[in-house]
Amino acid sequence: MKLFERLFSSLSQEVGKLKERDKRFVLACVALSGFAIQSAEEHLLPPFEVALGSSVGPPKKAKVLAEFALGFLACCEFPKGNTAIEFFGREPDFAREMIGMLVLSRSDDVRQTLDSTHYSRNPDETRVQVLLAALRILGLSYGSQNQALARSDFDSRWKVTVESFIPGAILGFSRIPRDVYVERAMRDVRSLSARGEAIAREFIRRVQKTAASPNESSRSGSGSELVRIALPTDQFVRLLMGGIVRLTDEQLSALAFAKDDQKRLIDVCMKAMQPWLGKDINEIPDFLELTAPVSDWLMILNFLQAWKAAEAYIEEDLEVLRRAIRPRLKLR
């Protein structure tokens, strides 16, 4: 009877009947496979086309976008612990595998798995591999485009995409009401190709046969785990706190921040400063400790990564803050 039902039921019906954690995994992976292509088109294709001096037209455009997406999926950073587990319901690398396979299915690529692309886990190495693959699709050589690519901002956009794709997606999707998110993701499920449906069904079979991550039962909520991080005082006051306070409505919108998010982050910063208000500057320690939920730290990191510094020394200071935060969030 189950086999009969399987043959004559739609994939969306199968997903709808899954346990909540299994449904969460499938919907997240399907949604992110489409979002990966979208991110490649919005953030990486424009500087690539500027370097070429021309637009990339169909059908080669779809293949180029798939290479960009597969490349940053192979090496992008996943937040470990409660944040990623809450979103995916399974370990991140399991999700990375399914997302990659769904991206391949969207471009009619003969390769079957993300591993078969042979993209490196090192972002700098993968960037070169991706550019070589994209130029090969277009029948161009890397040598002929090397200088133009170096003058474009492809490298900087690649770095931001690798670092912020998954944390940014988790943050963005968490802001959508649950019923709206599920409706959109189910729409993506219904739009999958026959190959995409076969991949989704295979992963449904696999998640139903495996237990959820041991972290699943110990979560207190999405991104609710408190993390304490010591940040260098100068960069913290001048850039982090000062930058968050000065965010305009337009900048808040671009970061997908609400006014309440800005206020909450200011409160987090002020708590770290509170013991030292009114003190002589020489009494303030070199590092200040901030305690905040993982979700707030992801917002802070998203803010720091989106900051386009006009001066090199400011970029160096921003990177000091990023490097202080990433390891504590267990980002790859």
Image (spheres, rainbow, N blue to C red):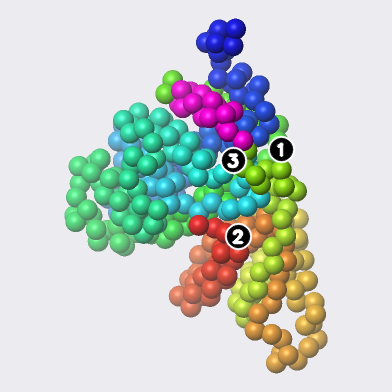
Marked residue nearer the N-terminal end (1 or 2): 1
Taking the spot 64% from the left edge, 25% from the top edge, the residue there is 18
Task: Residue at 72%, 47% (x, y): give it.
Answer: 218
Main SS class of the magenta portion in the image:
helix
Q: Which residue range is magenta in the image?
A: 196-211
Q: Which residue is mark 1?
A: 177
Nearest-to-viewer mark from 2 and 3: 3
Q: Quadrant of residue 259?
A: bottom right
SS class, disc 2: helix
Q: Secondary structure at mark 3?
A: loop
Residue 90's tag is 3
Kindly indicate whether the residue at mark 3 contacts the one at mark 2 (C-beta within 8 angstroms).
no
Q: Amino acid at mark 1?
A: Pro
Q: Which residue is mark 2?
A: 329
> How many marks overall?
3
Compute the Cα span from label 1 to label 2. 25 Å
Return the mark for residue 253: none
Q: What is the three-letter code of the residue carrying label 3?
A: Arg
Specify whether 66 is left or right of 198.
left
Quadrant of the rendered structure where residue 210 is? top right
Name the amino acid, label 2. Leu
